[in-house]
Image (cartoon, rainbow, N blue to C red):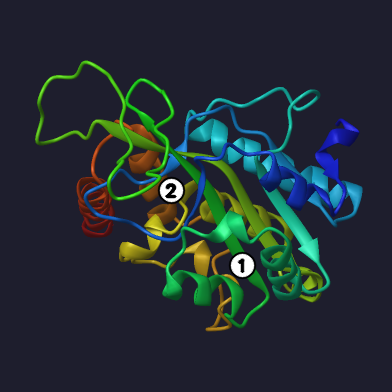
Amino acid sequence: MSNRILATLAAAAACLAALPAAAEVYGGAARDEPLPRFEDRLCPGVSGLQRDQAEMVVGRIRENAEALDIPLADPETCRANLLVAVFSDGRRYINELRERRGYLFENLDREQKQRLFEQEGPVRSFVRVVTRTRDGLVVDRAESLEVPPQTTMAMAHSKIYTATRRDIISGTVLVDKAAVPQVDIIQLADYATMRALAGDGAMDVAMPGGTILSLFDGTGAAPKELTESDRIFLRTLYGTQSNIPAAQTLSLAQRRIDEQVWAE
């Protein structure tokens, strides 16, 4: 596997800094807007692990993405847009990044900032999101209340679909080095898969049978891989139209998860 997979520690900041000005850090689901998801080809990368571990994480994430029919970029030439970075102190790193490049997080509200910058625990994650039209044209952010963002497109009136979609253009999962030996590589890769591909959307769905998102909660035995509920959520998110409001996607995912529970 290419050396490009083994990014340096600085790759986390570089990955963020090179994004469009209209991008924002995503902190949660606005139920009348679409849930963010990747539309570009996925390129997982790893920083801070031994080569064999990094290759296993990348391979597992690509395997998960392939199962969801998410297009994959050429690993020999692509630039990582899903980064798993292991640091001695992830909380310290993210706060230093905030001081150096505070504009990256200006769209977060107080609660979202608190969760990202102040939360305890060995892991934190965030995705960068850009709003695009249904056909993929970037919609710039509003410069003021008097000049809202505008775009021109043709679209039939609909109460089911929105005129825009929300694309994840990068996902970053930061893990404290001390926590890595406490989990196996498949668990780590599946946790990163769920965190980066789903953003915070899965937090609004009940997960009977557990979720890999509990891996670092310290609440008991965690799943060994993505659970069936996790997979149903991801299949729903990536198997429906990209411009469906979050409320509909979350409702559909919850219904499918509940049906699976009853079927068992």
Residue 119 in percent (x, y) is at 57, 80
Identify residue type, mark 1.
Answer: Arg
Label 2 crowd bin: few (<14), some (14–19), many (20+), radius 10 Å: some
Above or below — where is 76 with respect to 7?
above
Above or below — where is 173 with respect to 166?
below
Q: Earlier in the sequence, mark 2 or mark 1?
A: 1
Badge number at residue 124? 1
Above or below — where is 60 with respect to 48?
above
Q: Name the residue located 68 percent from the left edge and 58 percent from the top edge.
A: 101
- Name the residue beneath numbered marker 2: 231
Residue 194 in percent (x, y) is at 52, 53
Q: Name the residue located 56 percent from the left edge and 31 percent from the top edge.
A: 66
Specify the quadrant of the image occupied by residue 42. top right
Residue 187 in percent (x, y) is at 64, 60
Q: Name the residue located 69 percent from the left edge and 45 percent from the top edge.
A: 17
Distance of label 2 from label 1 (alpha carbons): 21 Å
Residue in front for this viewpoint, 171 or 260:
171
Residue in front for this viewpoint, 140 or 238:
140
Q: Quadrant of the C terminus?
A: bottom left
Dot 2: element: helix
Specify the quadrant of the image occupied by residue 120. bottom right
In the rendered image, is residue 5 in sight?
yes
Residue in front for this viewpoint, 174 or 64:
174
